[in-house]
Image: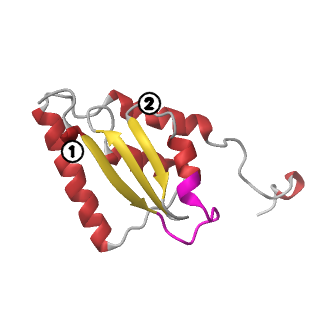
Amino acid sequence: MQQDDPQLIKRRELLFRTLHPDPAQASSAAQLLEGTAGILGLEPLSTILLRVTYDVRLITLSAIERSLAEVGYHLDNSLFLRLKRALYYYAEETQRANLGLERGCERCVEAFVRSYELRHRGCRDKRPEHWRSYL
């Protein structure tokens, strides 16, 4: 395969669940993923639909979705979408294996590190300090 092979550039759509504290998950997820190595384009099509264009040699759909779920985004998990995702995961892993790339990509780890850096850490208990000692 050539370096400029269009089969290596993937365009997928991520559908988020509607019941979430962030009503515009697609645009906030695009801001989170922006600048990640391997992601070539991010286009929020609606408040819950995000189109992602990426290079499969550098990052996979599985890594993108895992990093979003790790941060707290809720992807739609209907049966049809789970089957589509499973097919995409299998096809991408097979394509990466045929190219001689390792199973777990290094750029995928970078996506997790970036999402961890942007995550708010600390005490997540919303109660005031003096109420925390009570059950």
Residue 105's x, y, as percent? 30, 31
Residue 66's x, y, as percent? 41, 48
Residue 33's x, y, as percent? 50, 42
Secondary structure found at label 1:
helix
Q: Amino acid at mark 2?
A: Glu
The image quadrant where one finds the C terminus is: bottom right
Q: Amino acid at mark 1?
A: Glu
Residue at the image point whose x is 18% and y is 50% from the top:
90
- Given residues 121 and 102, the one toward you in this image is 102
Calculate the distance from the C-alpha at mark 2 to the C-alpha at mark 1.
18 Å
Please tell me whether the stretch drawn in magenta is mainly helix, strand or loop.
loop
From the viewer's perspective, tell me whether residue 41 is left or right of residue 100. right
Q: Which range is magenta?
A: 16-27
Secondary structure found at label 2:
helix
Q: Quadrant of residue 4?
A: top left
- Given residues 126 and 11, the one toward you in this image is 11
Query: Which is more N-terminal, label 1 or label 2?
Result: 1
Question: Which tag is nearer the camera, tag 2 or tag 1?
Answer: 1
Q: Which residue is mark 1?
A: 92
From the viewer's perspective, tell me whether residue 126 is left or right of residue 85. right
Q: Quadrant of residue 8?
A: top left
When the figure is inspected, residue 61 is found, relative to residue 14, above or below; the finding is: above
Q: Which residue is mark 2?
A: 110
Residue at the image point whose x is 28% and y is 58% from the top:
85
Residue at the image point whose x is 20% and y is 57% from the top:
87
- Given residues 19 and 14, the one toward you in this image is 14
Q: Is residue 8 magenta?
A: no
When the figure is inspected, residue 79 is found, relative to residue 72, above or below; the finding is: below
When the figure is inspected, residue 123 is found, relative to residue 39, above or below; the finding is: below
| Callout count | 2
Q: Is residue 17 magenta?
A: yes
From the viewer's perspective, tell me whether residue 46 is left or right of residue 64. right
